[in-house]
Amino acid sequence: MKKAIALFILLATLLTPGMAQTVADSVSQTPTQVEAPAADADTGESRAALQAVRTFYEYTGFANVRLGNIVMILVGLFFIYLAIRYHYEPLLLIPIGLGILLGNIPFKLDANLQVGIYEPGSVLNYLYFGVIKGIYPPLIFLGIGAMTDFSSLISNPRLMLLGAAAQIGIFATFIGALMLGFYPAEAGAIGIIGGADGPTAIFLSSKLASGVNIVDYAVDGAPIYAQNLIGPIAIAAYSYMALVPVLQPPIMRLLTTHKERLIRMKPPRAVGKTEKILFPIIGLLLTTFISPSALPLLGMLFFGNLLKESGVTKRLAETARTSLIDIVTILLGLTVGASTQADVFLTPQSILIFVLGALSFMVATAGGVLFAKAMNLFLNKENKINPLIGAAGVSAVPDSARVVQMEGLREDPHNHLLMHAMAPNVAGVIGSAVAAGILLSFLG
């Protein structure tokens, strides 16, 4: 029996110092100084063993699991299923899905247990620092800039208007969130979901709705802090980005005629190296002068593109578009997923955010398509725009452009719209960042 007790103490010691102390105290209470009858000794040892088993069980997930944890674990498994089975943004949904599992493993709160993402001192908490301080999104933009070719936009600058038109979803969602009772700062963070840009959504929510920024003051002068909406906003933004092939086609078909979908656009002109080098420099100065608050995002975007187009920093550009963006994507997806603990994520506000996100994405898609139709009213037959490419104005790069390509080929197997659609697609990235900077300057 003593060997059994020693085994339990060893097991408890390996698990946590707190458990070891509890077991040791239990065992120390067993009389050892005075020779006791054998029956009493066996009873005391049995109680100590039982207490050790009970303590061990209290520290397991089985003893601390709640219905919300199970619901979120199922959501995480669903994300992983979508990524593997249907290839919906696997680079994002697999880290986020597994992060949701990590964030919802139930455990007993203990001063000696520092494992949760919201517990200071834990590893996940340190990694989450890059989210709440807005560090990861600019690094993602650096990689995006290094892998993006702006040639299609440079060759046909008017298509930038489609990227701007699609941002109507952001401001429509902002107004909707205000009407539902969110504070202006929270509504601004929610509104950016309409841009279908995950890094931008995380960056803005980290500034406006991270749970530490003041949004109002009570009657007695006490500050009112914003809700921590980073998790719901990020999950909503990335979810709708992944569902682009599902959500956009019905809207595109509804708002266009068969004749409009058959429009063939002139091939984009060849763009010279000088133009490609000047574009990130001019783009940086122009956009950041308009929206200085977006400097962390736009600055890194155009910096990455300059590394790519300059031709003399190939090693840096290669690192930015491969190793760097891959590492940051892993950390960002995992920590955002882990931040969705059931007690934080499963709230009425989260449901409203998902509803608003879906509506904003639809409005943004419709806004781009309708604006393209409106532009055609002022263009001659040779310069007509296929309205389908307006749907690529949302900044889900390059998925929205691919959806446009597939829809174009569905109507005409020889009508390739990908290069045309990339223009409003990359313009949408710039437009959503500019919109985020404008919201931040007014609401931050």
Image: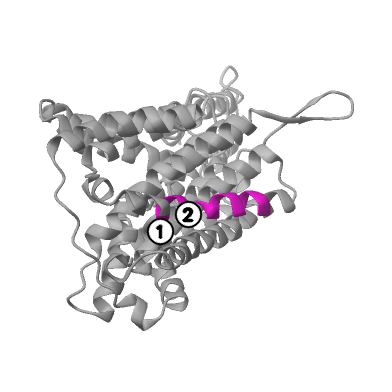
The answer to whether 85 is drawn above or below residue 429 in the figure is: below
At numbered mark 1, what does the secondary structure look like: helix, strand or loop? helix
Q: Is residue 386 left or right of residue 30?
A: left
Q: Which residues are magenta?
A: 162-176
Identify residue type, mark 1: Phe
- For discs 1 and 2, the disc positioned in front in the rendered view: 2
Which of 308/378 is in front?
Answer: 378
Q: Residue at x 58, y 42 (%)?
A: 189
User: Count of labels shown?
Assistant: 2
CA neighbours of label 2 inside 10 A, class few (<14), some (14 to 19), many (20+): many
Q: Quadrant of residue 417?
A: bottom left
Q: Position of residue 175 (x, y in %)?
A: 67, 51
Residue at position x 44%, y 65% from top? 369
- Asked whether, in this view, residue 298 is left or right of residue 321, the answer is right
Q: Position of residue 244 (x, y in %)?
A: 39, 63
Kindly identify the residue that appears in the image at 16 percent across and 45 percent down.
271
The numbered mark at residue 433 is none
Residue denoted by label 1: 79
- Residue placed at 67% from the left, 35% from the top? 226
* Of pointers 1 and 2, the one earlier in the residue sequence: 1
Instruction: Identify which amino acid the numbered label 2 is placed on.
Output: Ala
Which residue is situated farthest in the bottom direction here? 258
Asked if the stretch drawn in magenta spans residue 164, the answer is yes
Q: Which residue, given by chain and number where applicable, does mark 2 sit on?
A: 165
Main secondary structure of the magenta stretch: helix
- Label 2 element class: helix
Is 50 placed left or right of 222 in the picture?
Answer: left
Q: Is residue 411 magenta?
A: no
